[in-house]
Structure formats: C-alpha cells, structure tokens
C-alpha cells in the first residue's frame, strides 16, 4: 500500500498527497494510522480525536490528492471555520464519459442519502439527510474519438457533501470514469478503455490563507500532480 507524501508543512498543519486506495480514517491501514506514527502530536487534535485525529476534511478512499491535516487544536478550529465558510478553494480533476454540452457551468442540485444504502442521489423526494450542494466545472481537455470521447474536467465543489462531485457529474450524464457506484453498466463496460483499478478523480489543489503567523499571511495554493496511473490513462486515449 502506498503511503501519503508530505508536500507542505508548517508547525500548525501539513498538506499531504493521499494515494488512491487508502481511507482517511476508520479501516486500517489509513491516513490516521500513518499520521499517528509520523506526527503523534495530532493524537489530541480535532472534534473527535479518538477517531479522526487531525482530520478537518476528507477524501474518498479511491480519490487521490491534496489533503490538509491539522497538527494543533488552534489550527483545527481555524481551518474548520475556513471550510465551513467556504474560504478554502478545492480543485479536482475528473475524467468523465462524453463531452458536456456546456463547456463550463454550475450544477446546483441538493443531495440526499438513498434509503437503506450508502449512495447519494439528486432525486431527493424520498431521500434522507437532504442538503444543498453546488459544484462548478469547466472542460480542460477532450480525449478520444467518437463514439468514445472523454472530457478532463476541472471541478470545484462549492459545498462539501459526501460523493458530491461524483453524483453531480453523473446527474448531468457524465459520470466519472471508473466510479463503481455512479457509472451505468453500459458505460463501465465501454470497449477500449484501459482498466486502472480506481476512479479518475484527483484532488489537484487546495488554496487557502494559513493561520496568522504562517506563510506571512499570504494565500497559499498547494497542488499535487496526477498519479502515474492516471497520466498513463490519458496518454492511452
């Protein structure tokens, strides 16, 4: 199992590049296991440090990329508020099936939990825990030949709902390549697409203002390159 890589570090927080296939917390191995070994000071940080020490936001297991971790309670309180007030800009890269009709736009659809499942849905009439959700996207590049064309999207979730990007993109007919939950079987079996063992969703960057005293108060943008398996997939299209 690949381990996280530290890409930025200050005394109050650090930013890591999480590999796909590694959960943030819960099962083992996890990001939390790695943190407790390498940054034991996080043990008492957070709202529920016994379960999620240092964790102020999360990525799905099969999503790779930038994850911010708090090393002190001071930083946790600060960044929790920053995320709640949408002051942290999160940018993802997603390869999706097809080409969106609009090359850029917003998807403004509430999300809810489908009864008796772990799946989220935009069809909220009978869903539970329904919350507003807003996602902005733009097409960065188009790959492939008809009828098998794919779009690499730059995606910015303006809210932080579970599976938000995946459900929103599927709801407009362009699910994330390799997504086992929200991709119709007709697309998941598309001929000619190499199997990569994960979905093509990568947290490319976080942009934020660090706590007072860090980085001279300037806004930071921390980015992580696409993993090699995703680069290889794009090269094959």
Image (tube, helix red, strand yellow):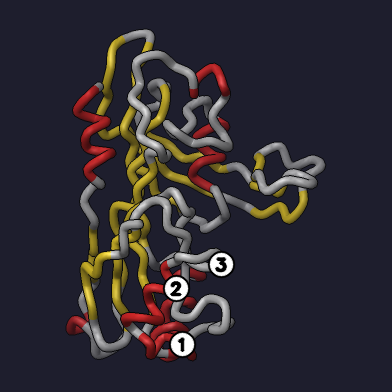
Residue 74 horizontal side relative to residue 168, left or right:
left
Where disc 1 sits, the SS reads helix
* Circles 2 and 3 in contact, beta carbons < 8 Å: no
Q: Earlier in the sequence, mark 1 or mark 2?
A: 2
Most foreground residue, 229 or 94: 229
| Residue 216 quadrant | bottom left
User: Which residue does the numbered mark 2 point to in the structure image?
Assistant: 32
Image position of 21 with respect to 13: above or below: above
- Locate residue 186: give its quadrant: top right
Mark 3 is surrounded, within 10 Å at the Cα level, by few (under 14), some (14 to 19) or many (20 or more) other residues, namely few
Residue 127 located left or right of residue 210: right
Disc number for residue 11: none
Residue at 23% from the left image edge and 58% from the top image edge: 223
Q: Are marks 1 and 2 in contact (CB under 8 Å)?
A: no
Residue 43, which numbered label? 1
Label disc, if present, on residue 26 of the rendered structure: 3
Q: Quadrant of residue 213?
A: bottom left
The tag earlier along the polypeptide, 2 or 3, is 3
Q: Residues within 10 Å of mark 1 (few under 14, many from 20)?
A: many
Q: Position of residue 158 (x, y in %)?
A: 46, 54
Disc 1 to disc 3, how far (Cα)? 15 Å
């Amino acid at each position: 199992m690949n381990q996280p890589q530290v890409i930025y570090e200050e005394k109050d927080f650090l930013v890591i590049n999480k590999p796909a296939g590694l959960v943030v917390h819960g099962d083992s191995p996890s990001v939390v296991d790695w943190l407790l070994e390498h940054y034991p000071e996080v043990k008492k940080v957070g709202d529920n440090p016994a379960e999620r020490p240092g964790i102020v936001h999360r990525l799905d297991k099969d999503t790779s990329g930038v994850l911010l971790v708090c090393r002190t309670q001071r930083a946790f309180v600060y960044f929790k508020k920053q995320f709640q007030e949408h002051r942290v800009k999160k940018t993802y890269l997603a390869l999706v099936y097809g080409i969106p009709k609009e090359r850029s736009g917003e998807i403004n659809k509430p999300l809810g939990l489908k009864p008796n499942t772990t799946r989220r849905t935009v069809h909220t009439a009978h869903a539970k825990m329904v919350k507003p959700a807003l996602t902005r996207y733009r097409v960065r590049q188009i790959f492939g030949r008809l009828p098998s064309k794919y779009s690499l999207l730059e995606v910015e979730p303006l809210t932080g709902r579970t599976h938000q990007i995946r459900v929103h993109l599927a709801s407009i007919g362009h699910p994330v390549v390799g997504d086992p939950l929200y991709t119709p079987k007709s697309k998941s079996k598309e001929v000619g697409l190499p199997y990569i063992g994960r979905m093509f969703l990568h947290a490319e960057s976080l942009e934020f203002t660090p706590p007072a005293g860090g980085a001279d108060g300037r806004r930071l943008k921390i980015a992580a390159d696409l993993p090699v398996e995703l680069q290889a997939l794009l090269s094959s299209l």
